[in-house]
Image (cartoon, grey):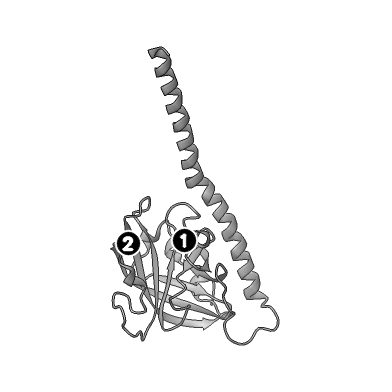
Amino acid sequence: MSGRAVVRTFGEVLITAGALLLLFVAYQVWWTNVVANRAVAAQTNRLLNQFEHPPPGLGPGPSPVEPGQAFALMYNTALGDHWNRPVVQGVTLADLARGIGHYPQTAMPGQVGNFAVAGHRATNGEPFAYLDRVGRGDDVIVRTDLSWFVYRVTDVSIVAPTDVDVIDPVPGRPGAVPNEQLITLTTCSPRWASYARLIVHGVLVATSPESAPPAAVGGG
């Protein structure tokens, strides 16, 4: 094979590799969001229907939650007046492609302890794309089948991925016994990388029945 043919073949290989790379980027940045947004819409519609028309035969307590199942809606006006996302039980890749994932070993909404969740900041629906806009004093609101919970942000920080104690019952104090109802939101930092974690902590400041939503989400 002549030198010219070798150069031409090598150039064709580079062009093909570049095209494949562009397709992969398009898939990650665009298509995963399309698929995730469809799943989020389906989960949200199912939850709203469940909240407004509870299945017959349920007891007075919270409904049981299965892995991979959406059980709550999260609202945050700092991320947009109409921003809300379903909260799914679990933090596997499949769970995080359907909304915000709840760390199963942590407290449930309204419980004493730390209700800790994770969400993508880029791709797969990117529910926490702009979590860096959330600051102290902002409210994170969680709706379940029985109640609304209003958490007020107390701290925002950047930590190493190995700092897993941020989701402990008392964040940063492994083994400590909790006496507050807390929330922790976790995501990657910066947005298009994963070498650090953006952490938002908050504390429960108000609870109301499901029939009485807070003013921030259209209540009285």
**Image label count:** 2
Taking the spot 47% from the left edge, 29% from the top edge, the residue there is: 16
Q: Quadrant of the N terminus?
A: top left
Q: Residue 99: give x, y in percent of width and height.
A: 52, 62
Looking at the image, residue 26 lies above or below residue 103: above
Name the residue carrying label 1: 80
Q: Residue 191: give x, y in percent of width and height.
A: 37, 53
Looking at the image, residue 188 lies above or below residue 67: above
As helix, strand or loop, the secondary structure at mark 2 comes to: loop
Q: Residue 94: give x, y in percent of width and height.
A: 53, 59
Camera-side residue: 72 or 80? 72
As helix, strand or loop, the secondary structure at mark 1 comes to: loop
Nearest to viewer (mark 2 / mark 1): 2
Q: Are marks 2 and 1 in contact (CB under 8 Å)?
A: no
Q: Amino acid at mark 1?
A: Gly
Using residue 197 as the reference point, say whether residue 58 is left or right of it: right
Q: Amino acid at mark 2?
A: Pro
The picture quadrant where one finds residue 113 is: bottom left
The picture quadrant where one finds residue 146 is: bottom right
Using residue 114 as the reference point, say whether residue 23 is left or right of it: right
Camera-side residue: 94 or 77? 94
Distance of label 2 from label 1 (alpha carbons):
27 Å
Q: Which mark is residue 161?
A: 2
Whether residue 36 is visible here, answered yes or no, is yes
Q: Earlier in the sequence, mark 2 or mark 1?
A: 1
Disc 1: CA contacts within 10 A as few (<14), some (14-19) or many (>=20): few
Taking the spot 34% from the left edge, 54% from the top edge, the residue there is: 190
Disc 2: CA contacts within 10 A as few (<14), some (14-19) or many (>=20): some
The picture quadrant where one finds residue 98 is: bottom right
Looking at the image, residue 118 lies above or below residue 204: above
Camera-side residue: 194 or 48? 194
Using residue 37 as the reference point, say whether residue 6 is left or right of it: left
